[in-house]
Amino acid sequence: MKVEIYSDGAARGNPDGPGGYGTVLRYVDSKGEVHEKELSAGYDKTTNNRMELMGAIVGLECLNRPCEVEMFSDSQYVIKAFNDKWIDGWIKRGWKTAGKQPVKNVELWKRLLEATKGHAIKWNWVKGHAGHPENERCDELATTAADDDPSTLLHDDGGDLR
């Protein structure tokens, strides 16, 4: 099955402000009908990069069988990790950067890697806030989640956010 996943993350007062992710999954069934699912959640004291990762993670974790995935994100952080093979280098160096520093958000990177298993994924960067309808919708979902009532936000403890 071919699936398109669009994701975005947002944070207010980055770092350590509230944030959220927004994800849209789309596929066409064998009858030609288009199906979409929207996902979002807000977190307290998080970062934009963590929310960008969560948007991609939850989209992939929704898939219950191997798929051909077109992933779209305006996050160079997420897209370059795969397209420019950053993640391969991090793994070879024991989750250290080329500068020998610990990779930030390693728990989420590991979770994202796990979520990619079994899927053929093409990672696509889209320019944010440039009129791309699905990216704009994900941005709306992410910012709405970030702006939710603080008492409803999930807690980001710096772990893998399960």
Image (cartoon, rainbow, N blue to C red):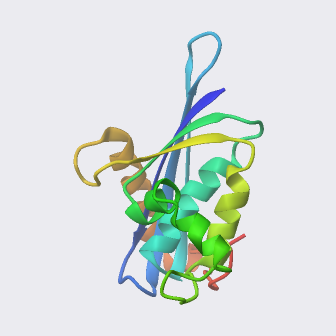
| Residue found farthest to the top | 31
In the visual, does 10 lie left or right of 30? left
Give x and y (percent) for residue 126: 33, 48
The total number of labels drawn is 0
- Image quarter for residue 13? bottom left
Q: Nearer the viewer, residue 116 or 48?
A: 116
| Residue found farthest to the left | 130
In the visual, does 57 lie left or right of 141? right
Give x and y (percent) for residue 48: 43, 73
Residue 48, visible in the rendered structure: yes
Q: Nearer the viewer, residue 17 or 69?
A: 69
- Image quarter for residue 111? bottom right
Residue pictured at 63% horizontal, 18% vertical: 29
Residue pictured at 58% horizontal, 87% vertical: 102
Give x and y (percent) for residue 53: 54, 64
For the C terminus, give its image quadrant: bottom right
Give the answer, above or below, for where 97 lies relative to 128.
below
- Image quarter for residue 12? bottom left
Give the answer, above or below, for where 67 lies relative to 160.
above
In the visual, does 94 lie left or right of 22? right
Residue 143, visible in the rendered structure: no
Residue pictured at 69% horizontal, 46% vertical: 62
Give x and y (percent) for residue 71: 50, 44
For the N terminus, give its image quadrant: top right
Residue pictured at 58% horizontal, 33% vertical: 3
Give the answer, above or below, for where 91 lies relative to 103.
above
